[in-house]
Image (tube, helix red, strand yellow):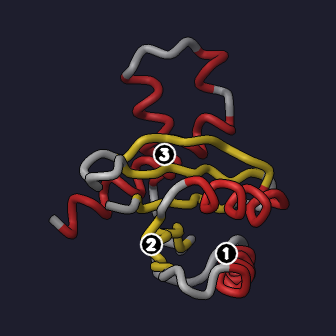
Amino acid sequence: MPRIMAIDYGGKRTGIAVTDPLQIIATGLTTIESKELIPFLKKYLAAEQVERIIIGDPRNWDDSETHATPLVAAAIKEIQKNFPQLPIEKVDERYTSVMAKQTMLQSGLKKKARQNKALVDEIAATILLQEWLGRIS
């Protein structure tokens, strides 16, 4: 089976997670500079089968757009332009970064490791994907 990929897109960095081939477990893959997203996807998709991309939809508590919402919309358009055959699904990403930081704290990571914003983004993408998997099963 092909994998499912989650993207936690940000202005500077983008966290990426994928499922195992059986689509059971979400695992953090990497964090890249956001401007490198399309080249990264081209390389990854040439090596791995992905059936769908889940991308975090940044919203405020009242469901209004955040400063990052237009950035994500632009990223989605760029992904669709380069990979028109690949379905993209926006999912609510509220609190994923907070949950990622909490996960890091609970797992016993040292303070310096918890300050690694790239790791926070990768964990946030993993949480996003694992929650999505939980909803569809």
List the single residue furthest toward the left: 137
> Pointer 3 and pointer 1: residues touching (CB < 8 Å)?
no
For the point 47% across and 69% down, which residue is it? 54
Q: In which quarter of the view is residue 79 placed?
A: bottom right
Where residue 61 sits: x, y (%)?
Answer: 46, 72
Q: CA distance from mark 2 to mark 3?
A: 25 Å
Mark in the foreground, 2 or 3? 2
Q: CA distance from mark 3 to mark 1?
A: 19 Å
- Identity, as a three-letter code, of the amino acid under mark 1: Val
Tally the marks.
3
Q: Is residue 26 above or below residue 59?
A: above
Circle 3 packing at 10 Å, graded few (<14), some (14-19), many (20+), is: few
For the point 60% across and 61% down, which residue is it? 45
Where residue 115 sits: x, y (%)?
Answer: 66, 27
Q: Is residue 61 above or below residue 133?
A: below
For label 1, the residue is 72
For label 3, the residue is 98
List the single residue furthest toward the right: 35
